Each structure stands twice: as C-alpha cells, then as structure tokens.
Image (spheres, grey):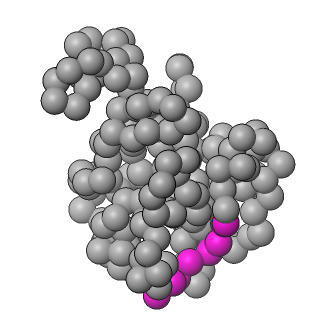
Amino acid sequence: MSAADPRAPGPGGGEALPVRPAARVLLVDPADRVLLFRSRPPADGPAFWFPVGGQIEPGESAEAALVREAREETGLAELSLGPEVFHRRFIFHWRGQVWDARERWWFARVLTFDPVFAGMEAVEIDDFSDCRWLSPADLHAVVAAGDRLTPAELTDHLPAFLAGDFTGTPFTVAD
C-alpha cells in the first residue's frame, strides 16, 4: 500500500477500510484538568470521553489540523502546542461506516476557558452529551461510573505528562 492509498487492510486482512488520519490534543489547564467531550456511540455501548481534535484534511499538517479543530470545537483562538506524546491506531464504527483511525496526540497547557461550540456542525454537537474540564480524580470517577476514556490508558500516562516527564519520542498506545 502506498502512502497515497487512503485504504488499509481490514480486520483479519480482508476488505480494505478507509484510513482516517487524525490529530488530537490534551488541553490541560493550570489546575491540571483535561478538557474532554463525552459521547455515546450510535450502537449500544458505554459512553466515552475524548479530547479536542479530528480528521486531518488533505494537504493539512497535523499541527494545523489541531489549531483548526480547537477553534471549531471550543472557540480557542490561539493554541501553542507542546510535545507530541503518543500515536494510536484503531478500528472504529461511526454513523454506519467502519474506519481505520491513525491518530497523533499532543499535549498543550492552556488557561482555563469556557468552550464555545459555534464552529461545530450540528451533527457534531448532536454527538456530544457533555464537555468538561476533568481532574485526574474525575477521570477515575467517570471510569468507575462505567464510561470509557479515549485512550483507555489515559489515566496511566497523564501523571507523567502533567509532570513534564516526556520521553521525547511519541510512543504507541492501544485502543
């Protein structure tokens, strides 16, 4: 498969799936809280929490996509990205489509702000059931209540990120 081929082998090597390159950013405020959205998948399943970010458009860098997505999803006018911290690849189902997601994740310190959703499309707003600044303790509480975090390992890695303990090389996370 060439780099220009937007399809990837499906699960088990079967039919190819469309590849969705994406970028996400863990926006962290001075109180060490992470801004996350909550959504419930269209099919039965637990609600899940995920950070700002989305698809990288053709010809757009991952960094430019994050600045655009942060503005569209939260109204944040300026974003100074910190280090790229990890990569994640997973297969997901959304709105009747199966995708092969390839995500790059960054960390960024920001001042606390109230998100404004004016730049989101109506279908995106309908996907969200909540948006909150969550402390590490809050993250454990939402998991204990039955929700999922994206990625599931977020609570394992967040303390090191908050302490500024980065390896310098993005690592891979599951899920």
Residue in view at x 62 percent, y 75 percent? 133
The residue sitting at the front extreme is: 44
Determine the image quadrant of residue 166: bottom left
Looking at the rendered structure, the number of numbered marks drawn on it comes to: 0
The residue sitting at the bottom extreme is: 137
Place of residue 85 in the rendered image (x, y in percent of width and height, measured from the top left):
35, 56
Q: Is residue 146 left or right of residue 159?
A: right
Which residue occupies the foreground of this view, 25 or 95? 95
Asked if the magenta segment contains residue 133, the reply would be yes
Q: Is residue 70 visible?
A: no
Which residue occupies the foreground of this view, 32 or 88? 88
Quadrant in which the N terminus appears = top left
Which residue occupies the foreground of this view, 165 or 138? 138
Residue in view at x 33 percent, y 39 percent? 91
Place of residue 79 in the rendered image (x, y in percent of width and height, measured from the top left):
63, 53
Q: Is residue 153 left or right of residue 145?
A: left
In the picture shown, does residue 100 fall above or below 40?
above
Q: Which residues are magenta?
A: 130-139
Place of residue 114 in the rendered image (x, y in percent of width and height, measured from the top left):
77, 69
Q: Is residue 44 left or right of residue 133?
A: left
Q: Is residue 103 visible?
A: yes
Place of residue 87 in the rendered image (x, y in percent of width and height, measured from the top left):
31, 47
Q: Is residue 121 left or right of residue 135?
A: right
The residue sitting at the right extreme is: 118
Determine the image quadrant of residue 54: top right
In the picture shown, does residue 163 fall above or below 82?
below
Residue in view at x 78 percent, y 42 percent? 122
Residue in view at x 30 percent, y 42 percent? 89
Asked if the magenta segment contains residue 84, the reply would be no
